[in-house]
Image (cartoon, rainbow, N blue to C red):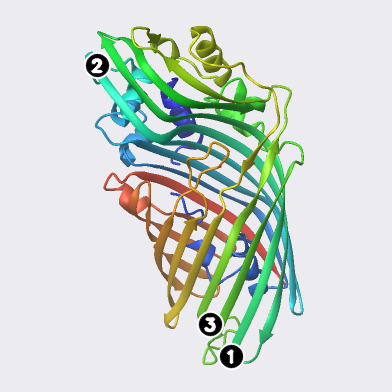
Amino acid sequence: MKNILLLSCFLTGFGALAQEHFSGISTSRRGGLLNAGMNPAELSNLQTKYEVSVLSASFNLSSNRLGFNDLVGGSNLEDKLFEGNKDVDLRFDGEIYGPGFAIKVEKWAFSFQTKTYAKVNFADVDPTIGDAVTNSAVNALFGSSTIQNNNNQRANGTAWGEVGLGISRILYEDDEHKFSAGVNLKLLFPGSYANLGADKFRGTINNDLGQVTLTNATANLNIAYSGELAQDFTEFNNYTSSLFGGLNGFATDFGVNYQWKDLMDTDNNSYKLNVGLAVRNIGSMTFKSSNNRATNYILNVPEGEFLDLNQFQDVSSLEEVEQLLLESGYLNSLPVSRDFKVKLPAVFSAYADVKVIPNLYVTVFGQRKLREDDANDQVTTQNVISVTPRYSTKKFEVYSPLASNEISGFTAGLGVGVGGFFIGSGSILTALGNGEQADIYLGFRLGLQ
């Protein structure tokens, strides 16, 4: 399929594109809407009466097979990605905070926030299948390979918008301790969706000097698409033009927060310890479009018969993939037009920010997904754990997030915040050593008394 489907497109569109968004800055002691995005109870820790979110953006790209130089260079990606025997995971994740506002009123705090998301994921893809479909099996110019893979191999793209209404309350506060709880109610605006899943794939791929065929094969296929991504899921514009669809979904975040105040510090917002727990993205959205399709098929290519895999090399549309498979006669049913629900990537997160000495803090953060990525109606995410040392004053901070996630492994980054402006990367330091992740984020917010 076309240039590993989207990879080169996104790299061209964003330049240098980790999985924990706003790594380091989202646990800053400054507080605000970014912190509330991670835990709605953090609204109670606003340092000013009002906060205005102007614009913040985070773009993450991680892989278990490609180094940083490969990710940003963009040459021979298909060849390198499908070398070896390890299943391929490749994740792009973009998150943009639009206009937002928060206000603190005595023990209460309220927020309004807009966001947009774009995600592209390749999960558990067998490298032999990927090489055969995208490259005419250039990594094996002749011979055959028998594959038996029990994972649900997925190629998936999703774009949607969100409007969040947050509320938090201080439950208990004295001179030394503060407990808060919060909830964020999210209205979801699904834009476009595309999913190709191949579960329990078994078959033999033959390669005769570039003529690649599949025989003696079975698989459970899911082909689903809606909106702009139905026509072409390799074009960057199809994601950006469909970030906000119609209102058709609902989700919630819940969180609690505890602060142990630092009575020796003259800064009223200083603490010795800030701890939080949150469950986010509990909900789903329904995709509705005139071109909606969501069909489960059984692929069956009998022994002695052959499916030509070369015909899929330049395909960029799931409609075309589906049509070619139907014309081959190896699918068992016709496509079904219907609405379908897609679950958000629900996660549990926990963190603790500890004051070591004046102006020096260390944050420990962990995120665990509550659903696995193999379901066809599931937007994917990653498990993450990070440690972030931070030098922080009232108007300035510099920090270095050190993290490990399940796709790209260990990463080390660097970020800085000056007033309301911040810029950083969760992987810039390991990228210098050709790490398997590339990301960047930046933004600006205003605190008003």
Q: Is residue 121 above or below residue 180?
A: above
**Of pointers 3 and 1, the one earlier in the residue sequence:** 1
Provide the residue designation for mark 3.
271
The spot of residue 199 in percent (x, y) is 45, 31
Provide the residue designation for mark 2.
144
Number of the label disc, if any, that sits on residue 176: 1
Check disc 3 and give the amino acid type: Tyr
Q: Is residue 368 above or below residue 211?
A: below
**How far apart in space, not on screen, are marks 2 and 3 (Cα)?**
63 Å
Point out the image quarter for the N terminus.
top left
Q: Are marks 2 and 3 in contact (CB under 8 Å)?
A: no
Point out the image quarter for the C terminus.
bottom right
Numbered disc in front, either 2 or 3:
2
Q: Is residue 326 above or below residue 2?
A: above
**How far apart in space, not on screen, are marks 3 and 1 (Cα)?**
9 Å
Numbered disc in front, either 3 or 1:
1
**How far apart in space, not on screen, are marks 2 and 1 (Cα)?**
69 Å
How many tags in the picture? 3
